[in-house]
């Protein structure tokens, strides 16, 4: 019989909304509020109207030594679940049984103090993460070497570049030695080289027979590190199974709209205003909305949106990911320098941005489109990492005379020359 | 938290119901974190300052000078027959320990918000380590009081042995008050505004700038003594300056009782609120 490290049983978490999220800005407002409705500022019972279930009836088990992924869209309850399992917050109902010491990495560098030096922060952060002083001392050199900040280890971290800060923070976390590791999205930061290093360290941990619970939006990281995956949707487990199946399910769930997706107000976890996404569609060469396009024909990705006010520097674009999580491309409507000049400020109004994707480009298979509307390095108005799923049909593509799937994400029609050198 | 391979820690996560006491066994397990957070508080407080830890001495001394000029010199406030500067400094020492502990510890939860929302540890460690850091400051400043005693030709007697008791009482009281304030601060940020104000008023109702002989009506005396810091400050001063000729059992017990009521109430309240900290902060 398999031994379980983590057993989650019917966990539910209810959060208060409404009353307690009302902001009071001045003391006068506060006093006025207390005066008019004395109970509202104090403790009121949670009812269906003033609360919502971030998690409800979540159950799953993790076998000892297994790595399990947790995926779901923003607001699906992933972080809440990790917070409960790392005991940051209590569940409202249900229970979980954990066998072993838990190390949680909900964020690297928790408790780092800008005024303290790198070395001092290693000790402080180590202690916060639950390491013993002797343990930290024995690993100190290793941690410093891993972080690559040797020269600055006695400099206050407030003078560090953000990259150095992150490396140091991750270095401490990476040397944590628990039986169960709970990780949230820590890999989403830093440059590509650093991410590679983090991922490497993570797969080391997973292969050492520790139990790992891993939340990420990075599907290829999930695929690489975990065997089993739980898919959460609106606080419930909608799928649990081998990672490949779960990722495929997750990336293609809920897209019955046949090649188009209209956004509704309740889909955003933060208000994208003044940017208003309206819909995204995939159009075949002939101009019909379709969830399947042909590999040999060009097709269009079209986004409709409106702006409440003028926005300078806005770029609207999309990216295409395979259902295994590999990125195929990213493109923005003002990539072209001429358009970048012309639309340096976009006036308020309704817009359609249409992109043509050439024929003989994508291989057959299923792809996910993610949408991003942002100002570079300033602000992201809107981000939907899986706005739409479409299929590419390979009929007539190069090489289809052999009925075998071609590996690779793209299937270009390449020019070959065959020279016969005679006898 | 040390784990040999055979022993596995089993944790049950479920909603807590009812009122529970702070878990002291767990606190002992986390003693290194208490040490590191105390050390951090001290380290950070005097980083990038010119005078550094000397501030721990300057603060009570400057206050003593101001008090001596205005209350002792100009207003001729009675000081129980002790030279005014020495009188006020001996009162200021425990008072500033109390005040600094309370001010720092009360905001400790909100100030460490990012830790609370990301990592589990017994939350009570945050106000506790703030109080301990203030205690270190107290010991840094203590020699100045001894110097002042020598200057004024005061000698200690056997009752100096009561000092640890009064120190403990100061720490317990300030910790107890901080438990209430810090837990309330999570939900009501008004506490951040109220605490400096409370500590100011509290100082006026504690015999620091004046001797408690000023309150002579027995009825008022009783109400006055409900302030646990009255017994602490008087006791500390008398024990230090060798005023006592017998053990003041009655006032010692009375102050202890009030301190313990505040402390235990605080421990229960804190524990009760603790589960919501990460959600509300």
Image: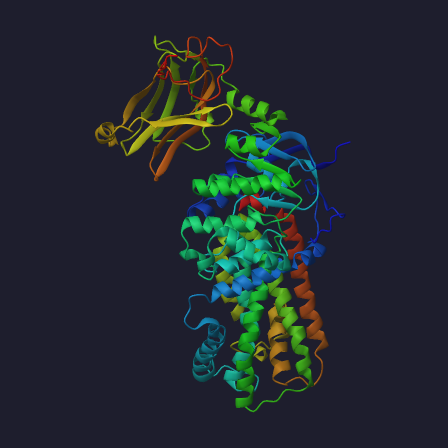
Among the 4 quarters of the image, the one containing residue A356: top left
Residue A90 located left or right of residue A326: right
Q: Nearer the viewer, residue A240 or B124?
A: A240
Residue A201 located left or right of residue A275: right
Whether residue A77 appears in this view of the structure is no
Q: Nearer the viewer, residue B56 or A143?
A: A143
Residue A291 located left or right of residue B256: left
B232 versus A299 height, above or below:
below
Q: Residue A361: x, y in percent?
A: 38, 18
Q: Residue A187: x, y in percent?
A: 50, 40
Q: Residue at x 41, y 30 (%)?
A: A383
Residue A268 located left or right of residue A124: left
Q: Nearer the viewer, residue B281 or B262?
A: B281
Q: How many marks?
A: 0
State the colouring used for the structure image. rainbow
Q: Residue A170: x, y in percent?
A: 52, 48
B279 versus B47 height, above or below:
above
B90 versus A17 height, above or below:
below
Q: Residue furthest front?
A: A423
Q: Residue A242: x, y in percent?
A: 62, 26
Q: Nearer the viewer, residue A356 or B216?
A: A356
Q: Residue at x 61, y 29 (%)?
A: A230
Q: Residue furthest right?
A: A1
B177 versus A14 height, above or below:
below
Whether residue B191 appears in this view of the structure is yes
């Amino acid at each position: 019989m398999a031994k379980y490290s983590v057993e989650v049983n019917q966990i539910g978490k209810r959060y208060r909304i409404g009353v307690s999220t009302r902001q009071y800005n001045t003391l006068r407002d506060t006093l006025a509020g207390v005066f008019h409705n004395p109970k509202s500022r104090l403790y009121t019972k949670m009812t269906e109207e003033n609360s919502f279930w971030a998690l409800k009836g979540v159950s799953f088990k993790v076998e000892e030594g297994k790595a399990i992924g947790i995926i779901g869209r923003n607001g699906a309850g992933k972080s809440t679940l990790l917070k409960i399992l790392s005991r940051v917050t209590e569940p409202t109902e249900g229970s979980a049984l954990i066998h072993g010491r838990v190390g949680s990495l909900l964020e690297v560098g928790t408790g780092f103090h800008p005024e303290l030096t790198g070395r001092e922060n290693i000790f402080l952060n180590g202690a916060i993460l639950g390491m013993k002083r002797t343990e930290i001392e024995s690993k100190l050199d290793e941690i410093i070497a891993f972080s690559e900040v040797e020269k600055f280890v006695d400099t206050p971290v407030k003078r560090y570049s953000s990259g150095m800060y992150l490396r140091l923070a991750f270095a401490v976390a990476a040397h944590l030695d628990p039986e169960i590791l709970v990780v949230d999205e820590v890999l989403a930061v830093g440059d590509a080289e650093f991410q590679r290093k983090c991922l490497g360290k993570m797969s080391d941990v997973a292969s050492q027979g520790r139990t790992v619970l891993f939340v990420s939006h990075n599907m290829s990281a999930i695929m690489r590190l975990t065997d089993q995956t739980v898919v959460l949707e609106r606080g419930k487990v909608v799928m649990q199974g081998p990672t490949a199946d779960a990722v495929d399910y997750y990336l293609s769930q809920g897209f019955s709209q046949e090649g188009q997706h209209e956004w509704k107000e309740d889909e955003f976890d933060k208000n994208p205003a003044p940017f208003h996404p309206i819909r995204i569609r995939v159009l075949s060469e002939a101009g019909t909305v379709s969830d399947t396009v042909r590999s040999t024909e060009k097709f269009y990705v079209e986004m409709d949106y409106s702006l409440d006010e003028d926005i300078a520097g806005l770029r609207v674009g999309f990216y295409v990911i395979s259902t295994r999580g590999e990125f195929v491309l990213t493109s923005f409507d003002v990539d072209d320098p001429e358009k970048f000049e012309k639309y340096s400020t976009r006036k308020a109004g309704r817009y359609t941005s249409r992109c043509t994707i050439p024929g003989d480009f994508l291989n057959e298979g299923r792809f996910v489109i993610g949408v991003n509307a942002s100002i570079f390095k300033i602000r992201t108005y809107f981000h939907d990492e899986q706005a739409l799923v479409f299929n590419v049909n390979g009929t007539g593509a190069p090489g289809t005379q052999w009925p075998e799937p071609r590996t690779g994400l793209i299937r270009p029609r390449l020019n070959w020359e065959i020279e016969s050198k005679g006898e | 938290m040390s784990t040999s391979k055979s022993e596995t820690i089993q944790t049950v996560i479920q909603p807590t119901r009812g009122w529970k006491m702070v878990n002291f066994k767990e606190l002992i397990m986390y003693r290194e974190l208490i040490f590191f957070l105390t050390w951090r508080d001290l380290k950070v407080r005097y980083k990038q300052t010119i005078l550094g830890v000397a501030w721990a001495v300057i603060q009570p001394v400057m206050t003593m000078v101001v008090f001596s000029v205005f209350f002792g010199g100009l207003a001729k406030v009675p000081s129980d027959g002790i030279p005014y500067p020495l009188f006020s400094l001996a009162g200021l020492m425990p008072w500033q320990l109390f005040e600094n502990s309370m001010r720092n510890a009360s905001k400790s939860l909100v100030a460490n918000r990012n830790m609370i929302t990301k990592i589990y540890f017994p939350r009570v460690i945050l106000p506790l380590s703030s109080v301990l850091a203030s205690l270190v400051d107290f010991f840094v400043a203590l020699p100045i009081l001894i110097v002042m005693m020598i200057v004024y030709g005061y000698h200690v007697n056997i009752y100096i042995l009561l000092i640890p008791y009064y120190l403990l009482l100061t720490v317990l009281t300030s910790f107890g008050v901080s438990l209430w304030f810090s837990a309330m601060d999570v939900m009501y940020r008004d506490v951040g505004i109220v605490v400096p104000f409370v500590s100011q008023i509290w100082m006026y109702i504690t015999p620091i700038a004046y001797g408690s002989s000023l309150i002579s009506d027995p009825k008022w005396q009783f109400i006055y003594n409900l302030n646990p810091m009255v017994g602490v400050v008087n006791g500390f001063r008398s024990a230090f300056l060798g005023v006592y000729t017998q053990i003041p059992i009655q006032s010692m017990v009375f102050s202890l009782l009030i301190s313990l009521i505040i402390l235990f109430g605080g421990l229960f309240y804190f524990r009760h609120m603790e589960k919501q900290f990460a959600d509300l902060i």
